[in-house]
Image: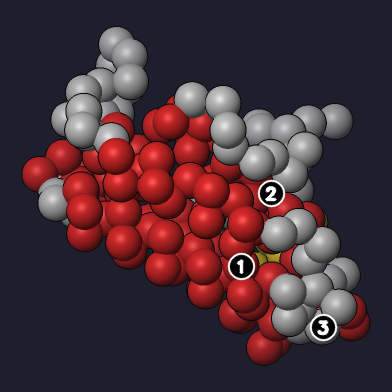
């Protein structure tokens, strides 16, 4: 039953490193988000994907719009947010998702999910893609050393 990746373990490993970051307002590169904005994006991603997962589980399939990640980061003023608060929110929300992943019923893993204009995928693929996306951004924030990795590539192969 569920998704066979221990996402909670990854979150436990990154928590002390996230709490030790001090350069939150520093951009990650030219024309890139700051670390705090990237952390805000991780919160947005958790919130958006939570609704996707719950609706696919409860309705048996999902048709859902994409979202403008840059607009979401801008309107929520993440650049001005309190880093400690966002770290707590991101970790808490993702721990709930990690718990939920382990409880996905086997008969729901193949539920068809359509997000925006993307090709349809299964609920299982959507969840695994979400984990890979979170890992990718955690590596951007903290560097790859010492972060457990599911082995899922990001961005995913587009065949």
Tag 3's secondary structure?
loop
Camera-side residue of 64 and 147: 147
Mark whose residue sits in front, 1 or 3: 1
Residue 43 located left or right of residue 155: left
Looking at the image, which residue is at 60% across and 51% down? 10
Q: In this image, 140 relative to 150: left or right?
A: left
Is the residue marked by circle 1 packed among few (<14), some (14-19), or many (20+) residues within 10 Å? many
The residue pinned by badge 2 equals 129
* 52 to 10, vertically: above or below: below
Sequence order check, earlier mark of 1 and 2:
1
Which residue is identified by label 3?
A: 105
User: Distance from label 1 to label 2 (Cα)?
Assistant: 13 Å
Label 1: state its secondary structure. helix
Label 3 or label 2, whichever comes before in sequence order: 3
Residue appearing at x 21%, y 33% in the figure: 22
Neighbour class for label 2 at 10 Å: few (<14), some, many (≥20)? some
Question: Which residue lies most toward the left here?
Answer: 80
Q: Position of residue 103 (x, y in %)?
A: 73, 81
Q: Residues within 10 Å of mark 3 (few under 14, many from 20)?
A: few
């Amino acid at each position: 039953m569920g998704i066979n990746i221990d996402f909670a373990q990854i979150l436990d490993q990154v928590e002390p490193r996230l709490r030790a970051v001090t350069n939150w307002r520093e951009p990650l590169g030219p024309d890139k988000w700051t670390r705090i904005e990237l952390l805000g994006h991780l919160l947005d991603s958790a919130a958006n994907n939570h609704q996707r997962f719950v609706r696919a589980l409860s309705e048996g399939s999902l048709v859902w719009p994409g979202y403008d990640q840059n607009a979401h980061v801008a309107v929520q003023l993440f650049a001005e947010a309190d880093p400690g608060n966002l770290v707590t929110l991101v970790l808490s929300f993702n721990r709930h998702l990690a718990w939920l992943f382990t409880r996905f019923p086997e008969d729901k893993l193949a539920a068809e999910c359509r997000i925006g204009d993307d090709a349809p995928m299964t609920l299982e693929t959507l969840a695994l893609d979400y984990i890979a996306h979170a890992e990718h951004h955690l590596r951007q924030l903290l560097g790859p050393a010492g972060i457990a990795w599911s082995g899922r590539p990001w961005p995913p192969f587009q065949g």
